[in-house]
Amino acid sequence: MKLLLPLFLYASFAITSCHAEEKTPVPGVLRYAEYADLLSGRAVAVTANQTSMAGEVHIVDFLLEKGVDLKAVFAPEHGFREMADAGEEILDGRDPKTG
């Protein structure tokens, strides 16, 4: 189960679903209540960039507001909070907003 948890969580955040009555896509992160118990008491890492949003809030801020023990954010080529040019070097560091 421990090995499958990261894959499950990735799928939960990445996959959207549609409410049958609305036919409106819902990002997995906004279905937080369905998997919140799986995150409880665990250290969590997120792969995200500046477009990783939960509605109007960045996914990292959303998870922190929910009390998730977020330990690391891995950002792809264009960065995490700010847009970087393709191929631009992005250094390791701490998020100035959340620490």
Image (spheres, rainbow, N blue to C red):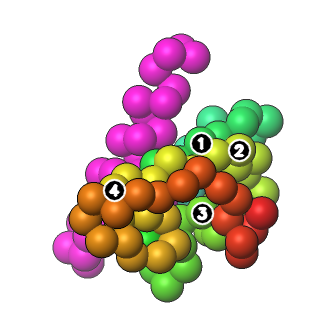
Which residue sits at x=70%, y=59%?
A: 94
- Contact check, label 2 and label 3, Cβ < 8 Å: no
Residue annotated with mark 3 = 60
Q: CA distance from mark 2 to mark 3?
A: 10 Å
**Residue 85 lies in what quarter of the image?**
bottom left
- Judge whether 84 appears above or below 31 on screen: below
Residue annotated with mark 4 = 77
Which residue sits at x=77%, y=63%?
A: 99
Task: Give the mark nearer the N terminus: 1 vs 2.
Answer: 1
Q: Can the viewer see residue 2 in this picture?
A: yes
Give SS at disc 3.
Answer: helix
Residue annotated with mark 1 = 45
- Judge whether 8 appears above or below 20 on screen: above
Q: CA distance from mark 3 to mark 1?
A: 10 Å
Range of magenta residues: 1-29
Front residue of this view, candidates 82 and 55:
82
Task: Give the mark nearer the N terminus: 4 vs 1.
Answer: 1
Q: CA distance from mark 4 to mark 1?
A: 17 Å
- Contact check, label 3 and label 4, Cβ < 8 Å: no
Residue annotated with mark 2 = 71
Front residue of this view, candidates 4 and 94:
94
Provide residue 33's location: percent of width, then percent of height: 59, 55
The crowd level at tag 2 (other Cα within 10 Å; few <14, some 14-19, many 20+) is few
- Judge whether 38 appears above or below 15 on screen: above
Provide residue 2's location: percent of width, then percent of height: 57, 17
- Contact check, label 1 and label 2, Cβ < 8 Å: yes
Q: CA distance from mark 4 to mark 2?
A: 20 Å
